[in-house]
Amino acid sequence: MEFWNEGDPIADTAAPDGPIETRWERRKFSAKLVNPANRRKLTIIVVGTGLAGGSAAATLAEQGYHVKSYCYQDSPRRAHSIAAQGGINAAKNYRNDGDSVYRLFYDTVKGGDFRARESNVYRLAQESVNIIDQAVAQGVPFAREYGGLLDNRSFGGTQVSRTFYARGQTGQQLLLGAYQALERQISLGNVEMNARHEMLELIIIDGKARGIVVRDMVTGEITTELADAVVLASGGYGNVFFLSTNAKGCNVTASWRAHRKGALFANPCYTQIHPTCIPESGSHQSKLTLMSESLRNDGRVWVPKRREDCGKAAADIAEDDRDYYLERIYPSFGNLVPRDIASRAAKNVCDEGRGVGPGGLGVYLDFADAIARLGRKAVEAKYGNLFEMYQRITGEDPYLVPMRIYPAVHYTMGGLWVDYDLQSTIPGLFVIGEANFSDHGANRLGASALMQGLADGYFVLPNTINNYLAAGPFEKVDEGHAEVVAARTQVEERLAKLLAVSGDRTVDSFHRELGHIMWEYCGMERTEEGLTKAIGLIRGLREEFWTRVKVPGTGEQLNQNLEKAGRVADFLELGELMCIDALHRAESAGGHFRAESQTPDGEALRHDDQFSYVAAWEYGGETPTLHKEQLEFEYVHPSTRSYK
């Protein structure tokens, strides 16, 4: 059976050539500008108010554009970026330990298993140093050393200390910085804020993105919102797995609506499994809880050497009977190996029967040595709120007994394809933050999500979107335009269809079943047989969904079941594309591990001669079309990724 078609390759990424160190400066200079008087005449829609969306809306409004901002939360500051804990990378080299823009660039390309675009990654490393200055100026309370300098710690995949942090609340503090900048522009009348509104369709006129269709989640009112350009900053799609570290509201609908209208979706199979999550405790759970990767700075990961010791209390297992397996297998990086490697290693020891806790699905993260070395007060200063959160959830005190952790779905490296200017294949539709695919390759290094979101929002998009808007003024359109009416009608008909099924199964039951399929066959390990089976199972589940789903209530009211139903309908289509993408990529790379493609010692085995490209998919129902963007490596030549 043919699951996909081959399409034309992607030839133009809009990236400058020449020395990589000067590409961004040359692109900024060559981009057209919009004079201040004309900016006031242009409107930009920004969907999402996390670090990427909030910083973009604030910065664009500061430049003089009129901005319409939309989020489904009740406040912009409740975007999921607030949940990020451990830190944000920047090549400041405050520790004088050999860091540089080039080393951050190198570590990110290598950490992504050589499946990222060099130009974008180098730009990200360049802008990282500006982000910290911006955040400090906004009052973000980064941790500081005794002398007053900003403190740093290490994260997985690096051998330098470049991660800036605010205890275990870095995402929250950075989001509050972006939020106050956004609120300033709201109070000045430059940003029109629309909370509790969900984007359900993209409006395209004459081939350009010109607006969105939104639903007021309180009243159920459907409205069309028009602009000169649209920016999607709607986050990732990890909730396709049902159980993930994402907030329950996180979804793919905004991106998927754009995909169905012509925006290519790139590398959907690249899913990050985070190694330090609180293990699942039972079938009652609706989400999982992340414990920051920063804990791996001082916590030591281990399991018993013998299966028969797994039922014992950790304190009853002698030091000689413990297997500090990351330190044993990867002595150079130890407990700070990248997330994909740490996650697979945890899975392997649990598959061997040496896991701890209920069901044997857990490993220990032990702070006894750190407490003995640093003292409890020092550990509390670094990780106190994380330890408190763990104790509240599990009832166990990590100061006295080791934490138990297990890998879980966390971040998605795939997303809508964008060029160097962050523009999708639909002119006028820009995509930033986790919603795009651009910077992380097959595996995101820890503390790089916040870096990318703020780089895109504060520094990249505000420069590149000018080049598009300089072609204006664009034709004025109103709600009576045929394409606007058609987009609104599509939304109304889809919602009516969901309400009309009136079946006998809840939305959550379908979502949970889809998540089980995805985790079982498209999770930490994938096979050709399993992926082929998963595609069939998802197609059958989707058919059942449209005949048996039960959505009570009406569309003219607050109706969370209707919201969830629309999101799950999109997840059912996305899940199939993820499996098709994973099936076509017959190699292992970063977070995508094909069991048929591994080294003799179980490490990921890439096939650069066949798969050194971005897989960008054009919507085609059950038979999407694959477009390839070949990756060229001039500065960081692909090699066998080793952290030993």
Image (spheres, rainbow, N blue to C red):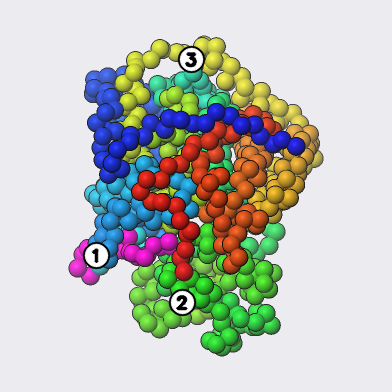
Q: Mark 2 points at which residue?
A: 367
Number of other residues with Cα within 10 Å of mark 1, as a class: few under 14, some 14 to 19, many 20 or more = few
Residue corresponding to mark 3: 206
Which mark lies nearer to you, 3 or 2? 3
Under circle 1, the secondary element is loop
Q: Distance between the residues labelled 1 and 2?
A: 27 Å
State which tag comes first along the sequence, 3 or 1.
1
Q: Badge 3 local density, few (<14 within 10 Å), some, or many (20+)?
A: few
The label shown at residue 96 is 1
Check residue 187 for magenta coloring.
Answer: no
Q: Which of marks 1 and 2 is nearer the N terminus?
A: 1
Q: Residue at x 63, y 62 (%)?
A: 280
- Tell me if residue 117 comes above or below residue 136 in the rendering: above
CA–CA distance in space, label 3 to label 1: 53 Å
Which residue is found at the position 39% from the left and 62% from the top? 158
Q: Give the range drawn in magenta.
A: 146-162
Residue 608 - label: none
What's under tag 1, amino acid-wise?
Answer: Asn
> For numbered disc 3, what is the local secondary structure?
loop
Residue appearing at x 28%, y 56% in the figure? 100
- Residue 450 falls left or right of residue 188: right
Closer to the N terminus: mark 3 or mark 2?
A: 3
In the image, which is nearer the foreground, mark 3 or mark 1?
1
